[in-house]
Image (cartoon, rainbow, N blue to C red):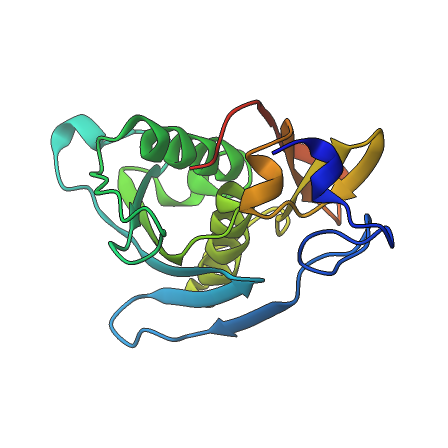
Amino acid sequence: MSRLELIGPQGLRTDGRRFNELRNMNCKPSVLSQADGSAYIEQGNTKCLAAVYGPREARTKAQVLHNRANINVEISLAPFSMEERKKRSKSDKRILEIASAVKQTFEPIIMTELYARSQIDIYLQILQFDGGTVQICINAATLAIIDAGIPMKDYVCACSAGCIDDEPVLDLNHLEESNTPELTVALLPKNDKITLLQVKKDTYP
């Protein structure tokens, strides 16, 4: 599909949005009673469930950090989350890349120095996929960490952007990010700083 087909004759994108318009967002904290913190987020047709456990004792000695807490991030895709119904394991390259991006985002933000020799586990499951995997994982994790009462230097907000027909567009859906390079930015609103800047040129996830 060419980029021209991503924008209709009235200047609207395939899902009816304008260039600078975000998808509708629905957020629900405290959705899992057994987790220390949890959240559910919908951004358009992409849906994510986040669960946070800890700070708690590290599962292995190899995970112990003597001066701060270790952050562990695991991501999974529900079998019904994508039209292709591809089976993805936790060792899938794309899954590992997303988990690494989430970990890199929160390591300098969570006040891990308060919980030396402990572990904070962040579990994220994509229930439905329509683009913006990294941003929704970061946004869901932020809410779940807040819900768990874990101190952070600032909260994190993430969004993707791209360029179609020389016009910048925000919050790419799957069709858009499959046909144009994608930039994902995670911001710290209070400190006015960027904690993640990631460029992808291929399909997500």
- Residue drawn 52% across the image and 51% down it: 136
Image position of 149 (left or right of 117): right
- Residue drawn 43% across the image and 40% down it: 112
Q: Quadrant of the N terminus?
A: top right
| Looking at the image, residue 53 lies above or below residue 88 | below
| Looking at the image, residue 58 lies above or below residue 166 | below
Of residues 74 and 22, which is closer to you in this image?
Answer: 22
Of residues 138 and 193, which is closer to you in this image?
Answer: 138
Question: Could you tell me how many numbered marks the image carries?
Answer: 0
- Quadrant for residue 94, please give it: top left
Residue at far left of view: 60
Can you give x and y, in whole percent of width and height, for residue 51 in the image? 34, 60
Image position of 16 (left or right of 9): left
Can you give x and y, in whole percent of width and height, for residue 83 in the image? 36, 52
- Residue drawn 42% across the image and 35% down it: 98
Can you give x and y, in whole percent of width and height, for residue 33 in the image? 29, 77
Can you give x and y, in whole percent of width and height, for residue 204 in the image? 47, 36
Of residues 202 and 145, which is closer to you in this image?
Answer: 202
- Quadrant for residue 167, please give it: top right
- Quadrant for residue 50, please give it: bottom left
Q: Quadrant of the C terminus?
A: top left
